[in-house]
Structures are given as structure tokens and as C-alpha cells.
Amino acid sequence: MARMKFLCDADRCIDCNACVTACKNENEVPWGINRRRVVTLNDGLPGERSVSMACMHCTDAPCAAVCPVSCIFPTEEGVVLHSKDLCIGCGYCFYACPFGAPQYPHIGNFGSRGKMDKCTFCAGGGGTEVSGSAEEFKKYGANRLAQGKLPLCAEMCSTKSLLAGDGDIIAQIYKERVLRRGYGSGAWGWMTAYHV
Amino acid sequence: MGSAKFTNEAAYLNRKFAAFWGTNNSDHQARICHSTTVTGVANTWGYGAMTNSYNDIRNAKTIMIMGGNPAEAHPVSLQHILEGKELNRANMIVIDPRLTRTAAHANEFLRVRPGTHIATIYGMLWHIFKNGWEDKEFMRQRVYGLEDVLPEVEKWTPAEVERVTGLPESQVRHVAEVFATERPSTLIWAMGQTQFATGTANVRASCLLLLATGNVGGYGSGANIFRGHTNVQGATDLGLDVTSLPLYYGLAEEAWQHWCRVWEVDYNWVLSRFVDKKFMETPGIPSTRWFDATLLPKDQVSQPDTLKAMFVMGHGANTITRMPESVRGIEKLDLLVVCDPYPTSWAVLSERKNGTYLLPACTSFEMAGSRTASNRSLQWGEQIVKPVFESRNDYDIMHMLARKLGFAEQLFKNIKVENGAVSAEDILREINRGGWSTGYCGQSPERLKAHMKNQNKFDLVTMRAPKSDPEVGGDYYGLPWPCWGTPELRHPGTPVLYNTNLSVADGGGTFRARFGVERVVKRKVVENGQEIEKEVHENLLADGSYSLGSEIKDGYPEFTLGVLKKLGWDKDLTAQELAIIQRVGGAKPDTVSWSTDLSGGIQRVAIKHGCSPYGNAKARMIAWNLPDPVPVHREPIYTPRPDLVSDYPTLPDARQFRVPNIGFTVQKAAVDKTIVKDFPLILSSGRLVEYEGGGEETRSNRWLAELKQEMFVEINPADAAERGIADDSWVWVTGPESHSKARMKALVTERVGKGLAWMPFHFAGWWQGVDQRSKYPKGADPYVLGESVNGLTTYGFDPATGMQEPKATLCQIRAG
């Protein structure tokens, strides 16, 4: 079984936000919730680099480790999903996550948090809804993986900077690129997310 | 006014509509986009379009971007640019006033002062000629006018280049060497060259660099001119232009006669629609000058009356400079019709109440039709969704209007209209029947639809399908124009213009013989030891250069029936072709040419013998019909360097496009009044990736609106500190004309150098500090509103095209 991963080639990312917009539209993510975002370092300075970040679907995901209700779990393909029925919006996962992935809608006074929301690798939700159902879409967004499709953010990437899919295959694509062009700033976040 | 969002068919229909209504006041976004490119580049080597393609950039060894930020304006093009950089370890050089998102990926970035492109290019050429890096053989065979350019190059010593541009000698020399010696090299540009009062001369300077280094007509080289919108290339080609009928035929009587034959309407009937013949053949009022034509006294506007009515289809008001004048213009119009999916800035800018109509047009996703990409490839788009609410598509709107105006029968003579629905396919077939001049003749709807169905068969880099394919075999994707002859000839399209390494039948070509076969000019020559001035006849045709398989092994003029007869090739014409040629030519069939022959026979026979239908000439370094035949550096109208104006003034005042151009007077007044004291910062403008054009559509998209919620001005930390301005604080920006002012957020960043302020141009809906949201019809207001940069931009027009100057003016910024 393939192990699904994301890889953003920072030498290719141009901060065009196609990934962000694709994610928003495909999953109908409301204003204020950012499952994916582009982070730019040294903005406007020599050496400026951008990288597209979302939930990396970590091995031994720290969010899952700290969740008091154990609503976060990896699928067989390594995609980290969660159940919004179990989630209590405590925010522990946000503090545990090295990538700032978990998001929470404001649902009441004093900034009280709603159910956690994050990138699902376009693989639907971790609840009891039927895979690919309208109920699942409403709660978690698209389930492209069930249809044999990859996350739309990577599919829509203008420069093929953002890669998604079987970790071995995308690592191979990236290695070949670095060898061919003679430079690479490394697979950002991979040490942290996948211990490699 | 038409739109770059139109399909090819809607653009063509719109221009035809204007002709039948009896006006040449027909324009669209290309005026403020690449009108200067079209004029400058076409006047150099024949056609004013991208010579190669995005995909072909993968073949380059040097990629130089001067005046473009494709990472934001053309994000997908970066895939090809970065692949090129990676595959060939190509040099990627960016020359720009800002360290753009594109520059962040370059191997080398040169920060240049806005409005000094020509000086920069001459600075490079100075080193190239001094070191012998030029391509002598290429120029001997294929380039005319080098000796006219050299004296200008000599003036641009490294010291003078640094004085004007701010670029040190070492940088200029280095990029000149790389560009000239690490070939193939491509030069990429967009609005950073075109949007100046010297725009046409700017792009001509770029052409000189490409010609001197032999970088035109091969893979990985060329002028890769990035066009915008969904279809600004096609809308330009199809004549939404005040100077031409569709496909660059111009406005002379032969052009009208040609199109009247295609339209099958009587020339005299069309003539009767105009005030008179002179008016019919005179360029109209460009989109940049409409309010001048409205506001100026009647005797200063060269038409029977001032401009009284605007019918605007898919064009924002806030992309045009000098908006305070625009507001007054809108108020003075008798009639304003905004035909658009959005009310746009036209609807809210003024206090106008009466005589204003909003007609709901659907987007181009809601109709079928073809679009032409920057690389000249056509793609057929099917209707994706039915028009929402009561909106109508562009074809049907123009049909309804033509019926009311009484010329629908003539306008749609050969175009099927069923139950009020116009056939886009039939319009394209009519374009094919008349589009010989630009090779829009071979791309039938059937061929384009076959390409869409077989997209997977085309190679990513060569764009070609395998010859064995039964449906699209041997074709280049989208049949990039020129796609010669009738669709039945099955010409594959031309992926790289002027490429002599391929036969014309295979997509090759030569430089176009557009400017005659010889030039008579006075030259100083030495005879018997004495220098005398002598009239010489100089050959403009190619010298020993020809495309693969050409039976003529030298230059040759454009093909006419007369030329075919001289060569004895007229025998190859079929009886039917000859009959059509004779019908077109009447008493003078020998003058019928490759561009007016409605049979396609002349093109077919020329190609059969390996020749380009349009001839085989030299590219022109000197374009004697332009205001500056050889490019000359001229300071922007509002320059931060008034000390340079005496050496490099703008051109004298003159009348152009039915209105006066008083750029010289304005520049002189600005210098005399030392305007730069009160407005010390350069103001430039450009694209954001999140928004597009005037931004009404994209600011109404909730995903995009979330990403960029406020109008802002980029200012250097040093300039901000002098003014006590903090990042993300409110500022007032003022401009030197019409007491203009605008309020927005400051973005303090070293992206801009000291002395430069930069703003995006996509915002509207705020005016001089006041939110105008309440003026939009309920529910039609975009999510994001903001001040328009063009509320601050100023006078300045390119004499050859009417292009505005939003890339270099002056402003002041204060906290507030």
C-alpha cells in the first residue's frame, strides 16, 4: 500500500496561491480557515523563497498523540484524518503540530473554538459518514482519493512545485530534479514529518 | 469598446459590428497592454506577436526577462521558464525596478530605474559591438539598417548608461556577454516595456538586441512577448483596434474591399454608413483618450462631434490612466452602456444618474468559441455552464442590438442564427475565409475541435502530434498562426516564426517582405578620395537566406498572381482558384496577392515551391515610418530626473488619433515647475497574482478576495522612515495632476528600491478616500474594494499607438 505524502519543491514555488485557491474551492473551505497556505521567507529580499504548507500527514503524528479524545488517526495510506463528531475543539493539536495545520472556526463569544479542520489530503473525513457521500463532503470536503485522484492543490500547481502522492514516487521525482539541475533546498518538512 | 475576454468570434463580430455601425472607434485592452508591441515588433520583422512559445522556452540557454513579472502575471509560464533553467542550466536574468517574485528565482537580478529600457539595451549593445559578440552572418543575410543604429549605440558609453539607468558597467557588460554568447537566448517582456510614452521604441530596442545577437527564428530564442487575459492575443488579431479591420488589414480602401468581399456586402453600402471615405479610412479614438475626446472643445477633436456615447463590453474604467478626467468624461457623456457580468468601475465612479444602462452579459465560460493563446495557438472552448439569470452571451447581445439598429441581415448574412442563438462555428468559418494575411485561414472549427479531443497526443516541448495520427497527425497544438491555406491544405501551423530550418509546409518561414523590396536613401560615400552624399538603392530582401526546401535560394517579394506568372508557377493554380483570383482582381488580376486571394491558391502554390507566401525579406533595424525610426531614449513625461530632460526630451506635441498629444508641453511644465520637489517618489504599477485586470471579476471571487483584502502601496523602508510611515498603516498618496489623492495601506518592503513606490492596478470602488460600496446595485458589489492607482497616474501617450504611461510617474506619500 502506498504511503501518501506531500513535497513542496521550494526552488519551484512562486507563491501564486493556485494550491490555496484549489483547496478552498474543491473543499468549500470558509473564510478564515486555511487548510493550506503559502509561506514566504525573506519576503522582498534577496534569497526570497516560498513554500506551500498544509498538514503533512506525519508519521507518528504529534496531533494524534496529544488528542484527549483520540479523534485523530492515520489511514492505511498514511493520511491523517479526524472525526469532527468526536473533536471537542480543545486546540491541543494546534500546539502539537509543527506545521500550524489545525484550524478552528470561531463559533461563539470570546473566540471559543469549533471543531478542528485541516487538510484531509482530499480523502474525505474520519467520521462515520459514507465515503464520498454528501454528508461527508459537508463536514470534511472532497474525497478525491476514493475516486483514484490526488489532492487538487498539487494537481493545480502552476510550476509542479507541490507534489502529492506515493511518498516513494514523489521522492524519486524530486531526487531526479535535484540531480539534473544541480541544486535543491531539500524536501521541506520531511525530517520533521516523516523522520527522513 | 470590446474586450480581451471575448472569444475570437465575439471579437471579430464586435469589430464587424463597429464597421457596419460606421465607426473606427473600436478598441479593447490591447491598447493599454501590447499595442506598442504589436506596432513595434510588426514594423521590425512582419508580425507583432510572440515569435516562439511558452513551451519552447525550455530550449533556451539564456532567459532574460525585462519588464515582466510572469510569476504573478503568468504563473504557469514559470513552469516552462524554471524547467528551462533546470534542463539546460539556463541563465535566468531579470531586469526590473522591483525584486519581483520572478526575480526571486533568477540567477541574476538588475534593479533598473523605470523608463530607461532603451538606455539599458543600448548599453548592452555597446559592449556587444565593442567585443565582437554580435552575429555578423545573421545580420548580413537577414537584417537591414545596422549602420543607422550604430551611431546611436556609440552614444551609450558605460558612464552614460549608469548616469541614466543607475546600472553599473560590470552588470551591464556581464548580461550583454551572457545574452550574446550563451545562446539560444530569449527575451521575455510584458507591460514593463510597453506601458510608456516610448513603448513602441522600447520594444523596438528589444528587437534590435535579438537581431544583433542572431536570436530570432530558432528554437529557444526569440521575442517571447507574454500576452494577458484569456484572449487578448485573439482580440488583437481580430481587429478590436482603432487602426485596423480584422487581422491587420488596416483601414485603406483595399482592406475594406477585401472584407466586403468576405462579408458579401456592397462596399458602397458600408461606405454609406460612415460620414465620408476619409473618415472610414482614418484611425479612431483609442481607449486611453476617450475622455479627452469627450471633454475637449469640439474644434480639437477631428471628427464631426466630440465623443457622446460609450458602449463598453468587458473593460474596466480603472485600468485607464488619469481617472479624475475619466470621472468628468463619464459625467459629460449622453449615453453610457456597461455590458458586463459586473457593474464595474464605470457604474460607480461618477455621480451620473441618467442615461446609464447596465446590460448583463455572461462570461466567456458560458459560450462556445475559440481563443488564441500568447503563442498564437487557437483552442476551442465549449460552453461550460448555461448563462446564469437573464444574462446573454456576447454573440446574442450583438445580434439583438444589430436587429434594433437595422443591419442584422447584413451582419449575419453568412452566419447561422437559430432561435436567436448565433453559431460561433459559422463566425470562425467566416474568419477562415478572410484571414489570409495572418494565416487564420486553416484553423477550421472541425480541426480545432479535433485538437481539443486529442490533447494528449501533442508533445510538451515541440507541441507536435506524431505524423501517424489519423486526426491531428503532424499538427502543432492549436495550429499556431500563420496556419496557411484552406483547412483542406492541412498546414500544421507555425510554432516558431521566421524559422528557416523548416520548410514552410512544415511550419517554417522567413522574415516578412512587408516594407517594399528596396529603400532609396541618401548615404555618405567616398568616391575618388572625396566624401559625397549619394542616393543609393538598398536591398530589403533577404540575402542568401531562405527556408528549408525553398526553390528560390534568395530573398523574394510577397506573392501575387503577377509574381507567380513571372516564375511560371501560375500553371499550378487550379481552374477554380484562377477563377476566384480573377473575380477578386477584376481588371487587375495580377495584383491579387496571398492576402487578398480568397481561393487560397496563391498561398498553396507558393508553399508547394517551398516559399513563404508573404515573401522573404530582411528584418528592419530602422523603421522609417515610425516617430523614432531608430529607438531613442526619452525621459518619462513626469521624470524624477529633470536634469536629463534637456538631453532626452519627449517628442514634440502633435495630433494623433483625432486628438492632440501635448506630452512635450506637459513634460516641460513639470520640469519648469520642479514638480519633482513636491512629488519626489517614482510611482509605478503592476500585477498581483490574485487579481486580474480592473479586478471586478476576481475581487468578486470569494477565494481570491480572501487572499488580498486591501489596496496597498509598496514603499522602501528608507522612504517610509523619512515620512514616519509604519508597515500596514494608512497613508495618503498624492499625484501631480488634477489634485489627485488616494488613501491606502503602506507595505514597507525592500522589494522596491529607495525612491520607488509601487501599486497594484486591480482595485476600484474607493475614490479619494471614500468607500463607494453603496453605489453598486444591491448584491453586485465585489467583496474587496480599494483605491485605483489610476486615480493618480498622469499624462503621457506613445505617439505611434496612444499607449498610456502608468509605469513611470511621480507621487508623494504621507502618513494618514
Image (tube, coloured by chain):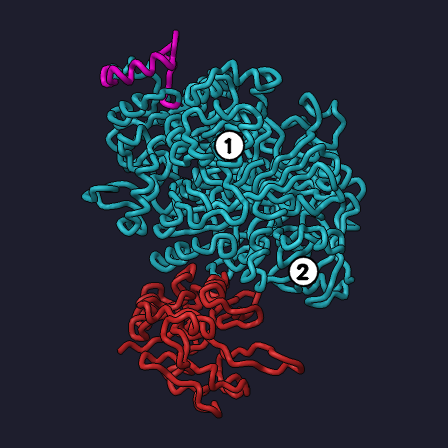
Chain colours: A red, B cyan
The answer to whether B270 is drawn above or below residue B677 in the figure is above
Coordinates of residue B6 in the picture (x, y in percent): 49, 40
Give the distance between the C-alpha atoms of the residues marked 1 and 2, in whole angstroms: 49 Å
Work out whether B672 lies above or below B434. Answer: below
Q: Main secondary structure of the magenta part?
A: helix
Q: How many C-alpha atoms fall within 10 Å of the one at disc 2: few (<14), some, or many (≥20)?
A: many
Query: Along the line of sight, which residue is nearer the eye, B525 or B721?
Result: B721
Assess disc 1: are there few (<14), some (14-19) or many (≥20) residues with their C-alpha within 10 Å of its C-alpha. many
Amino acid identity at mark 2:
Ile
Q: Mark 1: which amino acid?
A: His
Label 2 lies in what chain?
Answer: B
| B581 falls in the magenta region | yes
In x, y percent, where is residue B149?
Answer: 51, 33
In screen coordinates, is A170 left or right of B209? left
x then y, percent, for residue A148:
31, 68
Q: Which of the image's four quarters has the N terminus of chain B?
A: top right
Label 1, secondary structure: give it. helix
Residue B173's place in the image compared with B268, above or below, is below
The answer to whether residue B399 is left or right of residue B305 is left
Identity of the residue drawn at 28% across and 52% down: B456
Which residues, given as a range, are shown in magenta?
B571-595
Which is closer to the viewer, label 1 or label 2?
A: 1
Residue B684 percent coordinates (x, y): 64, 50
Dot 2: what SS?
Answer: strand
Instruction: Decide whether residue B16 is among the magenta residues.
Output: no
Q: Earlier in the sequence, mark 1 or mark 2?
A: 1
Q: In this view, does B475 lie to the left or right of B481?
A: left
Q: Name the residue under label 2.
A: B715
Residue B507 at least partly seen:
yes
Query: Which chain letter matches label 1?
Result: B
Residue tagged 1: B399
